[in-house]
Amino acid sequence: MQPLRPFEPRPELAALQLDGEAIWSDGLLQVRFVLRSPANALRWPEITLPPARRDGLWQSTCFEAFIARPASSAYWEVNLAPNGDWNVYALSAYRENLRPAEEITRLPYGLRRTQTALELSFQLALNPWIPAEDPLELSLTAVLEQPGHGLSYWAWLHSAAQPDFHNRASFQLLHPQETSGGSATCGPESTSSL
């Protein structure tokens, strides 16, 4: 697990701790976030049953992954809200031609919530776009909404003057498993420049 850090380390964020990890194995990307916070510290999206593909999830508490193939300008954005609503977008280049990745029809996820912690995970088969033996580039991010304080923007690495999850300079290289039965995890090799 590697820490995600807020773009602006405001005092009201000190009680929040967010970590994330990714495993790239056999063409399957597995991502897990663990958020520790006091009860009622965050605003949660309303429960919708059944959870569905929805737009605009980043306007409230939402966990995200940005995924790219090295040397390609195209990338994907995964959004997963803690109520199970989700979306996966494809982009042709930096913030260009955003469209739902219609070929992805579901996002298997897991959710565990207690009074002081939330664990959210998902898995996504990428082998139609990124061969299982190739590395990928990844950035784990989140938007957290606090009552009375608005949104804060969290990432493994912030590489721009403003919060910009699409900035490829913030993506980290993730290699696939190298030996049978092994897995690879990803995290920043340097700390965030806040």
Image (cartoon, grey):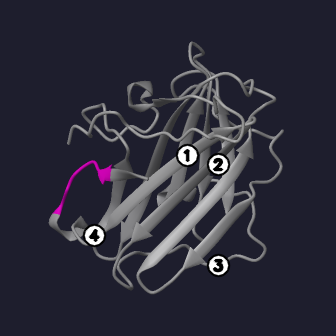
Spatial CA span between label 2 and label 4:
31 Å
Residue type, label 2 = Gln
**Which of the two labelled residues, at mark 3 and mark 2, occupies the earlier sequence position?**
2
Tell me if residue 1 comes above or below residue 96 in the rendering: below
Location of mark 1 (residue): 22
**Which of the two labelled residues, at mark 4 and mark 1, occupies the earlier sequence position?**
1
Disc 2 or disc 4, which is closer to the eye? 2
Disc 4 or disc 1, which is closer to the eye? 1
**Which of the two labelled residues, at mark 1 and mark 3, occupies the earlier sequence position?**
1
Q: Work out which quarter of the rendered image holds the C terminus and state it.
A: top left
- 8 within the magenta span: yes
Location of mark 3 (residue): 47
Can residue 123 be seen?
Answer: yes
Instruction: Give the tally of numbered discs.
Output: 4
Say what secondary structure mark 3 lies in: loop
Residue type, label 4 = His
Q: Position of residue 191 (x, y in %)?
A: 26, 39
Location of mark 2 (residue): 30
Tell me if residue 22 comes above or below residue 49 in the rendering: above
Say what secondary structure mark 1 lies in: strand
**Which of the two labelled residues, at mark 2 and mark 4, occupies the earlier sequence position?**
2
Q: Position of residue 31 (x, y in %)?
A: 59, 51
Spatial CA span between label 1 and label 3:
26 Å
Disc 1 or disc 3, which is closer to the eye? 1
Majority secondary structure of the magenta segment? loop
**Which of the two labelled residues, at mark 3 and mark 4, occupies the earlier sequence position?**
3
Can residue 56 be seen?
Answer: no
Q: Residue at x 41, y 82 (%)?
A: 116
Location of mark 4 (residue): 149
Residue type, label 3 = Ile
Could you tell me if the residues under marks 1 and 2 are in contact, i.e. CB atoms within 8 Å? yes
Q: Which residues are magenta?
A: 5-10
